[in-house]
Image (cartoon, rainbow, N blue to C red):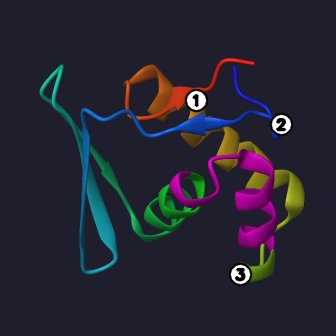
C-alpha cells in the first residue's frame, strides 16, 4: 500500500497516450489497458513527473478545489491501482 512518502517510477514497458484531456495507459508485458479521466490523467502526469506522491498531492491541492482528505484518499487509491496493474512501480528504499 502506498503512502504520501512513497516514491515510484513508470516502468519502461508502460505506454501513455493522452487524447482530449483523457488518457490510456498500456502495459506492454500484460497487454492490458487502463483508462483515466481528466483528473486521473492530471494525477498520472504529476506522479510520473515528481516520482513522489507528496509533491503530486501538494500540486493537486493547489490546482483543485477539493477537501485535502478526499484528494489524499483518491490519489493513494489511484496510485495503488496503478501499481497493482504494473503501470507504476515502487522504488526500493
Q: Is residue 87 above or below residue 24?
A: above
Image quadrant holding the N terminus, namely top right
Q: Locate residue 4, reporting x and y percent.
A: 81, 40
Q: Which contiguous range is marked in magenta? A: 48-61
Q: Locate residue 73, reporting x and y percent.
A: 75, 43
Nearer the observer, 56 or 81:
56
Q: Residues within 10 Å of mark 3 (few under 14, many from 20)?
A: few
Q: Locate residue 86, reporting x and y percent.
A: 38, 24
Q: Locate residue 43, reporting x and y percent.
A: 56, 59
What is the spatial separation of the Cα atoms under label 3 and label 1, in whole angstroms?
22 Å
Could you tell me which residue is drawn at 52 percent across and 38 percent down? Answer: 9
Dot placed on the residue nearer the N-terminal end, 2 or 1: 2
Q: Secondary structure at mark 2?
A: loop
- Is 60 one of the magenta-colored residues? yes
Per the rendering, the mark at residue 80 is 1
Between tags 3 and 2, which lies in front?
Answer: 2
Identify the residue under disc 3.
63
Q: Residues within 10 Å of mark 2 (few under 14, many from 20)?
A: few
Q: Residues within 10 Å of mark 1 (few under 14, many from 20)?
A: some
Left or right: residue 30 compared with residue 56: left
Left or right: residue 90 compared with residue 15: right
Could you tell me which residue is drawn at 43 percent across and 63 percent down? Answer: 41
Identify the residue under disc 2.
5
Could you tell me which residue is drawn at 79 percent across and 32 percent down? Answer: 3
Total marks in image: 3
Residue 20 sits in which quadrant?
A: bottom left
Q: Is residue 15 above or below residue 88?
A: below
Dot placed on the residue nearer the N-terminal end, 3 or 2: 2
Amino acid at each position: 500500500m502506498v503512502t504520501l512518502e512513497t516514491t515510484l517510477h513508470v516502468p519502461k514497458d508502460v505506454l501513455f497516450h493522452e487524447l482530449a484531456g483523457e488518457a490510456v495507459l498500456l502495459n506492454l508485458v500484460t497487454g492490458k489497458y487502463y483508462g483515466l479521466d481528466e483528473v486521473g490523467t492530471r494525477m498520472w502526469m504529476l506522479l510520473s513527473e515528481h516520482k513522489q506522491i507528496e509533491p503530486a498531492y501538494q500540486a493537486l491541492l493547489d490546482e483543485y478545489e477539493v477537501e485535502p482528505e478526499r484528494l489524499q484518499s483518491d490519489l493513494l487509491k489511484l496510485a495503488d491501482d496503478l501499481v497493482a496493474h504494473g503501470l507504476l512501480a515502487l522504488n526500493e528504499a
